[in-house]
Image (spheres, rainbow, N blue to C red):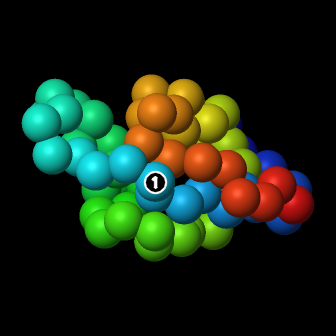
Amino acid sequence: MADKKTGKTVTVEQTGSPIRRPADQRQTLIGLGLNKMHRRRTLEDTPAVRGMIRKVSHLVRVVDEG
């Protein structure tokens, strides 16, 4: 299956601490490129990334969709 490059991105910021969270939520934050409070990452807007954001939605916020 070929990847379609649409150029859409989503910027997320970590707003919650992974302390006392399940290991899979910590690993999801690391997978998103977040590991410290108030860090931001601009990621490609794919279904996989959206699923990761949904999984840790209580620890991150979407800053910009573009």
Query: What is the total number of numbered labels drawn onto the structure image?
Result: 1
Residue topped by disc 1: 15
Q: Relative to 31, does residue 50 appear above or below in the rendering?
A: above
Q: Quadrant of residue 6?
A: bottom right
Between 23 and 3, the one lying in front of the other is 23
- Residue 37 in percent (x, y) is at 36, 65
- Residue 27 shows up from this direction: no
Residue at 12 percent across and 36 percent down: it is 20
- Residue 5 in percent (x, y) is at 80, 58
- Residue 25 shows up from this direction: yes
- Residue 3 in percent (x, y) is at 70, 49
Q: Quadrant of residue 1?
A: top right
Residue at 68 percent across and 43 percent down: it is 46
- Tell me the kind of residue under disc 1: Thr
Please state if 29 lies on the left or on the right of 62 as rendered: left
Q: Relative to 17, does residue 59 appear above or below in the rendering?
A: above
Q: Secondary structure at mark 1?
A: loop
Between 46 and 63, the one lying in front of the other is 63
Between 46 and 59, the one lying in front of the other is 59
Q: Categorize mark 1 by other alpha carbons within 10 Å: few (<14), some (14-19), many (20+).
A: some
Residue at 67 percent across and 50 percent down: it is 62
Residue at 16 percent across and 29 percent down: it is 22
- Residue 33 in percent (x, y) is at 40, 64
Please state if 29 lies on the left or on the right of 39 as rendered: left
Q: Relative to 62, does residue 7 appear above or below in the rendering?
A: below
Please state if 65 lies on the left or on the right of 17 as rendered: right
Q: Quadrant of the C terminus?
A: bottom right
Please state if 22 lies on the left or on the right of 1 as rendered: left
